[in-house]
Image (cartoon, rainbow, N blue to C red):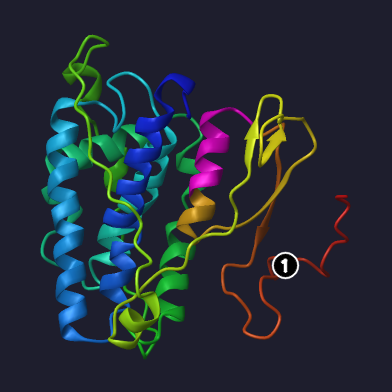
């Protein structure tokens, strides 16, 4: 999912996805002023328009024949778009299903072996509609879901061949300039993650860790798109027997933080070093 020959493009496209859609839907939904909301929602649909055009000529974001981590970044947001971001976060200019190529692309990735089992739309919806009370003060969770549409036929196999021409994307750098003052004006500004270490084959480089069976363990919440990316990559790469997992209760306790699912009699002792 991170081909060495295409690292720079993968990083560039991944940053474009992160700022253009992953963060932008939150900026729209959590804006505290009309101006901030309108700017954010325009950015969301500018991104979707550009991604629609890109996927008309390229099977995946970075390559015509090779899936990358940038695709995983995008698809977790696309999965949530019509059921959550369109309604709750007011990204309501158009539904995702109105984009032909994005919809077909989403169906292809959802139908890859192991991916569907990582999607729990009930938990996703319950989390968003119950926790983002500024957008949904009564915590009403809407009925219905677009999940069944992800199983419908797509045309990506028919449309593309290994010799198809690739299209280069343009990166949008993550911007933290004047973050405090922008937040004060009502804009939602996501902080920069402090987790910058990579797992590589040997782990010899700076900020690298070695790939070793049994060394790593995941704690995930099914509602979280960032956790979802990790679980999807784990499934696609066939790492279920290499990297173990515990699923946390998808509602974060305000006093105790993340906890294990309620059917656990007690929090199990973490046996990891």
Observer-nearest residue: 147 or 129? 129
Q: Is residue 230 magenta?
A: yes
Q: Image check: 208 left or right of 33?
A: right
Residue at x-position 46% and y-position 50%: 119
**Residue extent of the magenta highlight:** 229-239
Could you tell me which residue is drawn at 66 percent across and 71 percent down? 258
Residue 257 picture quarter: bottom right
Does residue 35 appear to the left or right of 145 in the view shown?
Answer: left
Residue 240 rendering spot, x and y as whole percentages: 66, 34
Name the residue located 28 percent from the left edge and 86 percent from the top edge. Answer: 185
Residue 80, given in percent of the width and then of the height, sits at 34, 57
Q: Main secondary structure of the magenta part?
A: helix
| Residue occupying the far top of the picture | 163
Question: Which of the 4 quarters of the picture holds residue 45?
Answer: bottom left
Q: Considering the numbered disc 1 on the image, is that residue within a helix, a strand or a loop?
A: loop
Q: Is residue 185 visible?
A: yes
46 up-or-down from 40: above or below:
above
Does the magenta segment cover residue 24?
no
Residue for badge 1? 263
Q: Camera-side residue: 19 or 66?
A: 19
């Amino acid at each position: 999912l991170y081909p060495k020959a295409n690292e720079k493009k993968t990083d560039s496209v991944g940053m474009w996805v992160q700022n253009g859609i992953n963060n932008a839907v939150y900026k729209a939904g959590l804006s505290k002023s009309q101006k901030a909301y309108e700017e954010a929602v325009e950015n969301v649909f500018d991104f979707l328009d550009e991604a629609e055009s890109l996927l008309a000529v390229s099977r995946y974001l970075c390559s015509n024949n090779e899936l990358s981590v940038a695709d995983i970044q995008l698809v977790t947001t696309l999965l949530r778009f019509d059921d959550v971001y369109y309604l709750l976060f007011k990204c309501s200019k158009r539904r995702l299903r109105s984009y032909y190529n994005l919809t077909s692309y989403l169906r292809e990735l959802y139908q890859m072996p192991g991916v569907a089992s990582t999607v729990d739309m009930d938990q996703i919806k319950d989390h968003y509609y119950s926790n983002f009370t500024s957008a949904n003060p009564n915590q009403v969770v809407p009925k219905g879901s677009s999940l069944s549409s992800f199983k419908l036929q797509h045309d990506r196999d028919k449309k593309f061949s290994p010799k198809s021409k690739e299209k280069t994307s343009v990166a949008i750098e993550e911007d933290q300039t004047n973050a405090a003052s922008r937040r004060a004006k009502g804009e939602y500004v996501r902080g920069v993650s402090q987790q910058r270490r990579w797992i590589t084959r040997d782990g010899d480089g700076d900020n690298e860790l070695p790939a070793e069976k049994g060394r790593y363990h995941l704690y995930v919440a099914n509602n979280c798109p960032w956790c979802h990316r990790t679980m999807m990559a784990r499934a696609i790469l066939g790492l279920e027997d290499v990297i173990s997992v515990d699923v946390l209760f998808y509602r974060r306790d305000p006093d105790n933080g993340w906890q294990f699912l309620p059917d656990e009699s007690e929090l199990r002792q973490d046996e990891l070093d």
